[in-house]
Each structure stands twice: as C-alpha cells, then as structure tokens.
C-alpha cells in the first residue's frame, strides 16, 4: 500500500465536494463516476508500471554516455503509455485533443503516480506543464508544430530557467537571443543547468521552454523572453540537430531516476529558438507554469511522505518489539510496536502532515479549476486565494515531508536506515522539494513581502473569512468547539505578528521586516493546515454516526489526527510568534567575518 | 576546512579548563602543550589519511564476497596507523601500554577524525570501547590473550548486542551459551545483526564482545552474560576458525564506508565464547561501554554537523546570488549569499547546534575524567551528572544534526542536493545517529522514566545548581543579564513540566507519564544547550576586550550565536511545555485500527 484510496476519496468527494465542478458547462461531461474511473486508471498504471521500478530506478541512475543521457529502459514504455492514454493534455480543451478534466482530478491522479515512483512521474508532468505554456501564449504555428508530438509522448518538453550564475536570482540570466531575418526566430547562445528531463533516450526529441534575453533588452526581470528551443528542429520532413548539447548530468542524493541535465546552446552558432508571445514578457508567462509547478511540488512531497507513512505504518503493525510500558514480565510475548505511544506519535505526526497537506493541495487545485470556469468577483476571489496560498502549498509539504519521512525512518529503527526497506529512499527523495521551484526562503519572501500585503491585504482578508466560516461551522459541534476556539485564538496571533512585521516595512526597515520570512511562512503553513484539519474533523464527526464499522475506524483516525495536530503542531506558533515579535535582529546584525 | 581548531581550543582550554585535569596525579604527565600535540597528531592523520577517502568510501561501499566483507583498501593503512600510534588504548593505564590520556582529549581527537571521515573513524573506536570491557571486567588470561592484538590494530574488536528479534528490547536476546567442561568456556549459538565492523579484510581477526544467555539463566535482562567470541580462536600457535559466519551485509543510506554485518554463530556447533566477569551480569558490564558509546554517538553527530557547517559556510562566502533585499538595481553585481539574513539564519542555526553540542560533549567527557580521578562526594556528584546528561548528550546532537546538515544542504540550494558537494553525504550520514546506541525514544524514557527521578531527583538538583551558578556569573555582565534571566525563567518551566509528569507517575498513570518522553528529552536538550551557550558567551565577552582583531571576530561570533539560540531555539520550550502540561492523551488513546 503506497497511498490510501479511501483517504483520497474522502478528500475529493466528502471534503472538497469535487463533483460540484461538474455543474459548470466546461466540466459538464464529467461526474463522480468518471472521476473515479480516471483515478482507477491512474492506480492501474502506478501499480503495474511505476511501482515495480521504484527501487531499480534509484539504483540505476541515468548516465551521460557519448553525449546522450541514457535512462532506465522501462521509462520508454511508461512515457509512451502516458502519452497514448492522454495524461499529458488531459486538462486541456476538447478542440486541442484534451479531455477538459478538472485539474483537481488530474492532480489527484498525479499524486498516485508520484506516491508509486516519484522519478518516473516527472517526464509526463514536465511535458504537460511546458506544453501548456505553448498552447496558452504561443502562436498557432508554434502550437501546431510542437504540441502534438509532446501530447502523444513522442517528444519530451521541459522548462529551462536556471543558469550557473542565476538560480534564485532569475533576473540575472544571460542566455542570449539574437534576432534573425525570420520573424520570431532567434539565435540562442548560453548555458542552462538543473534541467529536469533535459535529455534522455526514451523520446526522439526534447523541446525546451527556455528563458533568454534578446540583445538590447532591458536589464533584470523586465528583459526576459520565452522561447521554444528544441533539441532537434524541423527542417522540411526531417529533424535536424539544433546545437543543443548535453554538457553534463547531475548526480543527486535522491530522485535519481530522473535525468537532470546541464545544457549548452549555440556552441556551434547553430541553435534556433522560437519566441513565445511577446518579447520581454517571458517571466510573466513562465510564472503561470511556475505557479502550477509549485502546487505540484507540494503534491510531490506529499506523495513521497504518504508512501513513507504507509511503509512505516505497515512495519509498525507487524514488528514485535518490547512490551507495554507498564508491563515488565519478560515471559509475555513482545507486542507490535504500533502499541507504543511514541511510535503512535511518530505515525500521527506523519498522518497529520501528509493528509493535512493533501487536503490543502486539493483545495488549491479546486481553486485553479474555479478560476478557469468562474467570472467576475468569484474568479478574482479564487485567484487571490490561490495566489496567497501557493507559497504555502509548495513549502509546507516540502519542508514537513522531510521531517515526516524522517519519522518513517525512525519508526523502522535500524531497518529504516538500510536499503532493505524503501523509507531511506523516500527520505532522500523528499529533500529536493524545499529546493526546487523556489527555495523555502524565496517563498517566505514571496508570502510576507508580496502576497500578504497585495491589494491592501485583500487576499489574506478573504482567507481569514474562509477560515472563520469553518470555525463557525465547527462551533456547533460540542466536541469540536474547543479546537475551533483554539484556531481562532491562533489566527489572532498570526494577525498580530503580521501587523508587527508590516509596521517594520512601513518604517522602511526592509531587512528586519523580511529577515524571518521563512519563520513567517512556517507559521502561516501551520495555521493553514490546522484549518484543513478542522474541516476534516468536522466532516468525519458528521459522517461517523451513519458509518459502518470500517468507516467508523477511518473517521476516528481523522478525529484523533486533528487532535494530534492541535496538541503538538499548532502550539509551535507560540515560539514562532514570540521570536517574530522580538526586536532582536540577530540575523541582520550578524557579520560574515564573525562566523 | 572540516572543523575549527580555534573553536576546539576555545572549548577545551578557555571554557572547560581541561588543563586543570593535569593537577590530578593520574594525568600529571600531561599539560596543555602535550594536549595540543595530541590534537595536532590527530589533525595530521585526519587530513592526510581520512579526509582524502571521504567520498571514495561513500561511493565504494563494502561488499560481501565469498563469505568475507571487503572494505576500501585504504582502511588497512589507517587501522594499522591508528593502532601503532596508540589511539586504541590511549586512555588506558601506563601498565597496560596506555598513555593515561584524559578521555576529554581523546574524544576531542575523535571529533577531528569523525569530522574528516566518519565511517573511517569507527574501526579504532569500536576496538577501544570493546577492549575497555575486556580489561575492566575480564580475567587476566582474557586480557593477555585478546587485548595486545586489538591495541596494535592487528585485530578488530566489536560490540555484538542486537539480534533479529531483539533490538530496543535487548532483554529478549536468544543467543545461547552452553557450558563446556572447561571453566569459563561456552559453546555459542545464535544470530547477531547490525554489527559495526563485524567483519572485514583489513584485520586478521575480529573479536566480538557478545551478549548471550547461559542455558537455564533467568528470563529477561537478569539472565544476560557477556562473552568474548572471536571470529578465529587461538589453538596453540595458530588461529582456527571459530564458526562465526558472516551471513550478510547491510547496505545503508549513509555511513557507507563502515561494514555492518549479520553474523551467525555455531552453525557447525563449533563456536566457543569466553565468559567475561560473572554470569548474568553481562548487561551491566555492557552498559559501561554503551554509556561511553552514547557520548561518542553525540560526538559523531556533532562532527558530521560541523563538517557540513563549514562546507556550507565556505559556499555561502563564495557564491554570489541576488542582491540585498532593499537593493533593486539589477546593474549592481550580485552579492555573496552570506549577506542574506535567511542564509545567516541557516548558518547561525548550524553553528548554534554544533558548537553548543560540542561544548556539552566536552563537559560530559571531562565529567568522565573527573569520575576516574575523584573520590567520595565529588566522584558521586560527577557520576550522577554524567548519568543524567548521557541521554541528552547522545540525543540532542543526534536529532539536531539531522536538521543542521539539512540546513547545510539548503544553504547550497540545488548544488547541495547534487553529489558535486559533500553536504548531501553529511545529510545521509547524520541520519543514523538518532537510531543506533538506543533510539531517541529509548533515551527519552531513560531520562524521564529513570534519570530525572533517581535518588529522589538528586541528579537533576545537582544539574540545576550548576546551571544556577552559571546564571549568577552571567548576571554580573549587563549585556548577558537578560539572557541569564531568560534561562532562569525557562528552568522554572522545565521544573513545572517535570513536576506535572512525575505526578502522573505517582498516580500510576505510567503510559501517560511517559507518552511524551521524547518531547521531554527535546526540552531538556534545549535547556542544557542554552546553559552551554550562556557559558560560551560569558567566556567570550570576558575575553573579547583583550583580544586581537581576529579573536574579536571569533568572540563576536560566539556572542551572536548565543543570541540566536536564545531568540530562535530556547523559545521552542514554550510549545513543548504547553503540550506536555495538556491532559489530552491523544497518542495513548489512539488505536492501531484507526490509522
């Protein structure tokens, strides 16, 4: 068991009411049954094709041989199957060959793929995200030239942003684009690093959605344009090498099945790129993809954390060790470790992190769907909410699943540290997520420095109104009431901290204002997940009475996990708030020479 | 740079006043100069022999081939050198060929070895610890037969405790010892797993200090005896195979250079073991070694964390990325990331963890030396303190260096996740320490369930008196006073929580009393390290005025890091205390079926 279908259904249908999306004309051909069929199809692929390669792909990492990256040979069939079954473009319009599937359902299917074998899931995901940029901002010609082969899985697509000297500071990229006599066609020269699926032998071509600067463009972020830069370009009926060289491959701690390339463009002065949309607007286009990708990274982390949780839960149920703490008789048989309070604590921690994260991510996915189909004020409201929640949906799962996979390792003890069990792999794989798609530090600055105060704090106001609605609903249940009140009191603490930090901004103390942005993000993450848990518990308690025995156990688990989260996690805001309200600016004052 | 000699000297000579040990007759031949020579010798070996193999040993792990484990060929010279230079038995008596070196200095040298290449350091350490058991509890014959070859590095020694069905619950071991006609000689049959350095091809024999049960012995911990079980036994002038088979090797996430074996004894009914000391007292003997080993595990974690800290510090000083947060001009060159507050926060976190841990570990090592040379009340006081602090000295560094190596990875960003830099290896290696030598959960129960209340709480009383002395001393410095007061107020919180939990024990609520023992251990760790930092800052501020420029920077760093610890780490007690005083026993109430 690498994920829980019962929990995924709970999240999608009992909590988030995803069927309600089918009331919108755009999604009207779908219903709950068809959603479940999509998820069943994902599960079948995950179980039959992805999961069996989980360990193998970790132990046989891609290699750069004679200028070409060779990946696990099993990936060829997977990429082909994913293309043929329509997973690349499932969420796109019918007229484009898509299925108009809600993002919520596609992301839930992605969760299943990622939980089975994260590395194997990224090829299709990259192609979907990158081709979405072409179809949204590209010319008809670009769309017709490039998207069909990407959709079918014949070609790989990627996003190519980072350069050796420009990672977090994207505005410093120097990859150059020089106009040619042909409109929209540029000569490209530069280096890109850390390109996921940037080169491999399971597809016949790789199409990069690449950021570059047109000669003479303004400095900084305002001078960045977006190009399609294929590894091989089409000339007549044939594919011709486009002077994109794989200069290197990065070997990594985990996530080893995915090839991460260093690309060199234009070394032979024969690399052509095709402008997407207008010049100098590349970064704003790319942000569409990056915002989607950030929610997906949160989902990746959650999926890996989920697989680790079930691996450790299974072990805890089967492994006998020690006796109850009050039982000293050595003649009694040993008890399964799941009966020890400290083991239950580690399992509850994991459960609270992964199921709390999953519900936030499904909420955010549904917001993306609603933005797509709604208009006017409703659309704006959902857009503001998603904008505000994106750094949290990316970072909370990413940071916390490093800790929850660590708890999985700890649950297995010595066995968890060996390669005899998969948890050590999950621990290594989880560690990439606080880094890629913007480090946690970057997202803290995004949240505190931009999102919380945008439009005079409108997004945060909307969020707090939504949370208050959930609190009100929970207050009518006597068992839940103390927790609802607790959440309300912590919301006040969060607002106090926010006011304090924004007042520093108003005083022009920019460095002090943002010095603890990472802690602010952590605090905001905790309160957001506490909100999700209040809703999960409210739903569970409501349904528990009518439920049959197995479902009663499931709902009891939800109720207890919410209690765990409020008892052990929510209170962490105490220390965070205390620190952020302090005027001791030690991290600003510290000097490099003093280390 | 993989450690700081400046800091180590600060810790040993400015803070812990280790020279004062030389006033005792046992250590009278040593002085500060000779201590520094020992450390220089350790550094030379670390730099020339251990450090160059750090990456190689990780990438070429030991393999079991034809029943024998093959390790990195460079280890042969290292083990030989360590034996020849007297590192195995340096702390033992002159008449045994030792140097009567204080444990404090030996552990400081070990810290240098471990920071250079953890895996390579364990061979000598295991031999030292295991042979210490033979010389302390074994007969003259056992000592003469086995220790010379172990001291010289010709033979490897190990500790063999864990079995497939008995890890945390050691009392459940089933390895059997059957008396023979020869007194003190037993036939051994059983399985042992996770035996560090349990078999390898760099020594000609491996001597296991093994726990087993003599037939007819009492059940549980009271029936465990200690044996010397060599891989090859001496018959006349030759070594004969002693029916100890290497049944398997464990491959691991990190710490890969060290061979971890699965041993099978007596499959051919020809395995002999030699009783150490009296029958059924094996566990108490083994605890001598385990208590030493627990302090060493804390040091291992600290050393790995230190190496990761300096790797990330070095990167942060050299890597330009982005501009000051208040600087938007893209024409300005990028600034080294050490100038970003969030990066400084990650570095201060690491520095506070590794230097705070190191000072606690040196304090504990000095306690061990004082116990050795003191008598009467003083000896008892030091023994109680060390007994109380051992679970903390083991667990705080172990748990926190998982997080501090994670901060090192994060500081490097994408580069940190690749194998181009050593931090990902440190992240993997750090993860073993919360597991071996007793998991964190076990140490929590040891601290709260035994150490805090032993002799009516005498050890804890002694510790709080010592801390109060440091607070008093710090109160006379105006800059330090607020921090001293803060520490005092948190000591009260810790005492409140302790009283609350002990009252549960008195009410017979054993499960509830110990359910959060891991959190209690975390809280106690934080307060203990806060105490260490108060002392470090007090020393630094006192010396700062007379110091030359470079030393001023060093002392400033200490002062700022103490501030960091009090602002960001000490406050975490708020949330921990709040949780532990709550009467919501969610982890006890949770049922296995509800997960």
Image (cartoon, coloured by chain):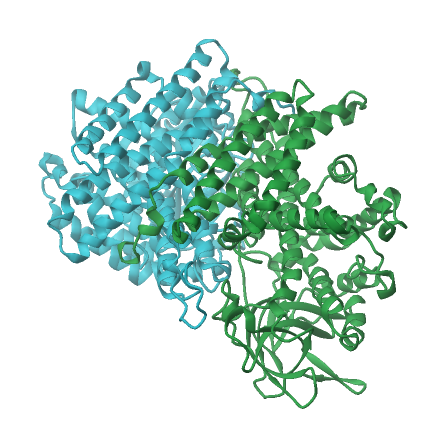
Chain colours: A cyan, B green
Q: Evaluate whether residue A446 shows in this view.
A: yes
Say above or below: B586 vs B432: above
Farthest residue, direction bottom: B181
Left-right relation of B552 to A584:
right
Question: For the point 80% across and 24% down, which residue is it?
Answer: B547
Residue A6, percent from left and from top? 22, 53
Count of picture labels: 0
Residue A574, percent from left and from top? 42, 29
The C terminus of chain B appears in which quarter of the rendering? bottom left
Residue A262, percent from left and from top? 52, 43
Comparing B342 with A493, the one in front is: A493
Left-right relation of A357 to B226:
left
Question: For the point 29% across and 52% down, which residue is it?
Answer: A112
Farthest residue, direction top: A507
The N terminus of chain B appears in which quarter of the rendering? top right
Left-right relation of A160 to B205:
left
Comparing A40 with B118, the one in front is: B118
Residue A20, percent from left and from top? 12, 38
Question: For the point 55% across and 20% down, which residue is it?
Answer: A585
Say above or below: B96 vs B268: above
Question: For the point 52% across and 72% down, which residue is it?
Answer: B173
Left-right relation of B468 to A133:
right
Say above or below: A566 vs A173: below
User: Which quadrant of the view contains residue A382?
Assistant: top left
Q: Evaluate whether residue A89 shows in this view.
A: no
């Amino acid at each position: 068991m690498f994920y829980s279908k019962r929990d995924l259904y709970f999240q999608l249908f009992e909590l988030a009411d995803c069927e309600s999306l089918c009331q919108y004309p755009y999604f009207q051909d779908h219903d709950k049954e068809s959603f479940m069929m999509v998820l069943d199809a994902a599960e079948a692929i995950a179980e039959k094709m992805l999961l069996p390669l989980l360990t193998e792909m970790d132990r046989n990492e891609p290699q750069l041989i004679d200028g070409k990256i060779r990946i696990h040979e099993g990936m060829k069939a997977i990429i082909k199957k994913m293309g043929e079954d329509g997973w690349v473009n499932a969420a796109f319009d019918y007229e484009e060959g898509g299925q108009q599937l809600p993002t919520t359902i596609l992301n839930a299917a992605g969760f299943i793929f990622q939980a089975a074998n994260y590395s194997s899931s990224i090829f299709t995901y990259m192609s979907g995200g990158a081709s979405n940029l072409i179809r949204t901002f590209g010319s008809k010609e670009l769309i017709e030239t490039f998207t069909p082969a990407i959709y079918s899985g014949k070609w790989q697509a990627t996003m190519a942003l980072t350069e050796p000297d420009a990672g977090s500071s994207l505005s410093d990229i120097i990859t150059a684009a020089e106009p040619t006599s042909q409109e929209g066609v540029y000569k490209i020269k530069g280096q890109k690093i850390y390109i996921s699926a940037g080169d491999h032998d399971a597809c016949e071509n790789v199409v990069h959605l690449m950021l570059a600067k047109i000669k003479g463009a303004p400095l900084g972020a305002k001078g960045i344009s977006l190009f399609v830069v294929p590894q091989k370009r089409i000339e007549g009926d044939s594919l011709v090498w486009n002077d994109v060289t794989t200069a290197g491959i990065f070997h990594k701690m985990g996530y080893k099945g995915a090839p991460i390339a260093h690309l060199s463009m234009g070394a032979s002065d024969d690399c052509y790129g095709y402008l997407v949309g207008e010049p100098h607007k590349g970064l704003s286009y790319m942000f569409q993809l990056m915002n989607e990708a950030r929610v997906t990274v949160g989902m990746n982390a959650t999926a890996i954390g989920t697989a680790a949780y079930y691996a450790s839960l299974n072990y805890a149920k089967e492994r006998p060790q020690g006796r109850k703490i009050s039982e000293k008789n050595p003649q009694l048989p040993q008890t399964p470790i799941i009966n020890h309070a400290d083991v239950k604590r580690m399992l509850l921690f994991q459960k609270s992190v992964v199921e709390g994260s999953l519900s936030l991510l499904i909420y955010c996915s549904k917001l993306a769907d609603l933005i797509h189909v709604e208009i006017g004020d409703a659309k704006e409201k959902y857009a503001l909410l998603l904008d505000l929640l994106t750094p949290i949906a990316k970072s909370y799962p990413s940071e916390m699943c490093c800790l929850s996979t660590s708890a999985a390792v700890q649950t297995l003890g010595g066995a968890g540290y060996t390669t005899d069990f998969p948890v050590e792999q999950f621990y290594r794989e989880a560690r990439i997520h606080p880094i890629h798609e913007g480090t946690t530090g970057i997202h803290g600055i995004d949240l505190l420095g931009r999102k919380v105060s945008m439009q005079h704090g409108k997004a945060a106001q909307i969020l707090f109104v939504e949370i208050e609605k959930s609190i009100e609903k929970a207050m009518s249940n006597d068992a839940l009431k103390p927790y609802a009140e607790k959440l309300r009191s912590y919301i006040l603490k969060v607002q106090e901290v926010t006011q304090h930090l924004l007042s520093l901004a108003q005083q022009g103390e920019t460095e002090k204002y943002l010095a603890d942005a990472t802690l602010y993000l952590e605090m905001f993450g905790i309160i957001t997940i506490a909100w999700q848990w209040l809703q999960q518990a409210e739903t569970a308690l409501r349904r528990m009475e009518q439920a049959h025995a197995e479902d009663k156990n499931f709902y009891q688990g939800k109720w207890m996990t919410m209690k765990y989260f409020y008892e052990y996690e929510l209170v962490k805001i105490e220390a965070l708030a205390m620190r952020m309200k302090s005027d001791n600016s030690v991290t600003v004052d510290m000097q490099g020479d003093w280390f």
